[in-house]
Every structure is written in structure tokens, then in C-alpha cells.
Amino acid sequence: IRPMYSTVFLVALMIGSILSVGLLTNLSSHDELHATTSGDAQLREYLASNPPDRIVYTENVHWGHSYAFDASIQTTSIPTLGLLTLEESVQSAATTAIRMDDVATLRELDIGYAISSPIGTVALTLGPSPYWSVERNYQGARYWKLWDEPSPSRVSEGIAFDSTTCEEMKGCEMKLDPWRNHRFNDPLDRSDHRIILEKKGTYTWNSVVDDANVQGLYNVCIVYEQIGDFDSYQIIINERAMDLNKMSGWNHECTNVQLNQTLDVRIELNQDGAAWINPLGFSGRSSEIIDSTGLRIHHIELKR
């Protein structure tokens, strides 16, 4: 009997080892699983070489915590564990001031900059403000500068995709966003679900924008996650195909488009997604354990 138990134990150990290697392989090719993005890392390298002369506003979540930055850079967000870089927390007051466009309070707090990760939502508050300009952008990880006087040239608008349109299209699904419990304010008022495209097909959103005032040349950006390594897809804005980097993880892709009231988006997947083991399914952050490669669509950004 003992040899049988030993054999079963060894087989179980081998299966566990194989699964562990598989999960590590998945992590290496699925940047969307990480708590920060490749763009966040690039932005931190830039700040280390070009330290700001004032406090930097950061979101009080994984991708904004101060332990990820050079020790000389003062940021507003403070993790539960770790050394404080400010004498006292100004996070709550700064967040309220940003949402209210209260430049006077931000100056009193000595805040002159902000950074945003594509994982977070603060960019959707900073973008529509005429007081903030984007100084650096690394695949949606952005460095913002605060100005005392407003300028309409700085304003951008975030636009959500219609979830009902997705539900009416074959192959388009609404699934839980893995980071839903870490976003505390969404200016676009989206639910905890995001659009997921995994099946071969053409997915069309007509009139994502339909506004008679939208006339002329606009910079149009789409924020999405590429789940896994693949490149068999296209994104077309008003019949203009975008030049995409197609990187695993978070993507912030932009193109200039001549608009005449409406903006249409078409996404084409040339093949079905490939199955993979999603470790987030074991923790409950994802609803899937046996998952599929594909696209998770977040929103559109529009700027003159």
C-alpha cells in the first residue's frame, strides 16, 4: 500500500509542478495581470531622471503608491505599510480639490503635478479640466502639470462604449473587471463589467459620438487591454485603421481623425482566442479559470 501512496504523491507533485510552470509562463505573457503597467514603469524612470519640484498627486491604490517611486519624489498616496514621504497625508484634500478644479487649494498643498495609470480613473477627471496638461504619455501612463490659468486646448473627453450594443452582438460579452474593487470613482459611471472580445468576428459601435459640435480634426484614443500575446486584430475609427503596437497588457492607442458629428468604432478579430489558465480565477478577481486571449475594452478619449 505504501508504494501506491508514494506513487500517487509523486504523480500529484509532478502535476502541481507542471501547473506551477504553466502559471508562471502565463504571467510572463500576460502583462494585464500585473498591478502596474509597462507605461507606469517608463514614467517612473522618467521622473527619476527629471524629478518634479513640487508634490505629485497619485491615486491611493497599487499603481500609485509611493514605494514604487524614487525616494526623493514626494507623492500624495501612502500605502498602508511603508515609510511616509510627507509629514501628513494630504490625499483626501487633494482628491477633493482635483475633482472640484480647486487650483487654489492644490497650490496651498504644494501640488504641481499628477500622474495617472491606465489602470486607474483619475485621468478621466484630469482630462476634462482646462487646468491640467499632459507632459508625458507612455501607453496611457501620463504625467500631468497643473496650471494657474485655464486653457480649452488642454481639455479631453472620456467616452464609454455602450454595453447594450455589446450584449446585442454575437461574441461580445460583458465580464467582471479584475480591478473593479480598486476603483473608487468613475467619471464615466461604468459598471463593474467591461467589454470582452474573444471570438473571431467584426464588432461595431456606430455613433459612439454623435454631437453636431464635433467638427474638424480630433485626436482619438482607445484604452484597452490585450489579454495575452497575439496580433490578429484591427481597430478602425471612422474607416481609418489604427497603427497598433499590439502589446500584451494595457494599450493606449491614438490617431488623428477628421470628424463630422459622429464617430464609429469597428474592431475585427481574425481568429478565436486561445485558452489559458488565469490565476486570478483562483482568487475570485476573475470569473474565469480557463480563460481565453482577447481584448478587454475600456473607453475612448477625444481631444481637439
Image (cartoon, helix red, strand yellow):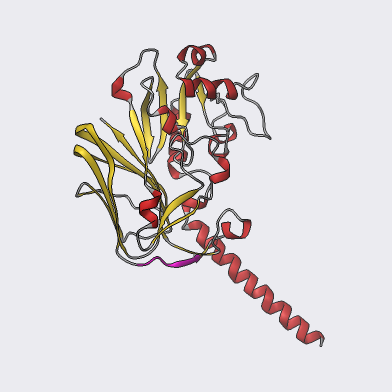
Decide if residue 52 is in sight here: no
Specify the farthest residue to the right. Answer: 2
**Lateral position of residue 106 relative to residue 135, left or right:** right
Identified at 77% across, 82% down, the residue is: 5
**Lateral position of residue 217 relative to residue 235, left or right:** left
Identified at 26% across, 39% down, the residue is: 210
Q: Position of residue 88 (x, y in %)?
A: 65, 20
**Quadrant into which the N terminus falls:** bottom right
**Residue 137, quarter of the rendered image:** top left
**Lateral position of residue 43 relative to residue 300, left or right:** right
Q: Position of residue 246 (x, y in %)?
A: 34, 53
- Look at the picture and state if 293 lies above or below 50: below
**Residue 199, quarter of the rendered image:** bottom left
All told, the count of numbered labels is 0
**Residue 188, quarter of the rendered image:** top left
Identified at 68% across, 75% down, the residue is: 12
Q: Which of the two residues, 288 or 53, is positioned nearer the viewer here?
A: 288
Identified at 38% across, 29% down, the residue is: 127
Decide if residue 136 is in sight here: yes
Q: Which of the two residues, 103 or 160, is positioned nearer the viewer here?
A: 160
- Look at the picture and state if 197 lies above or below 86: below
Q: Position of residue 220 (x, y in %)?
A: 28, 39
Q: Position of residue 77 (x, y in %)?
A: 58, 29
Q: Which residues are magenta?
A: 272-276
**Quadrant into which the C terminus falls:** top left
Is residue 80 magenta-colored?
no
- Look at the picture and state if 259 lies above or below 234: above
- Look at the picture and state if 226 lies above or below 42: below
The secondary structure that most of the magenta stretch takes on is: loop
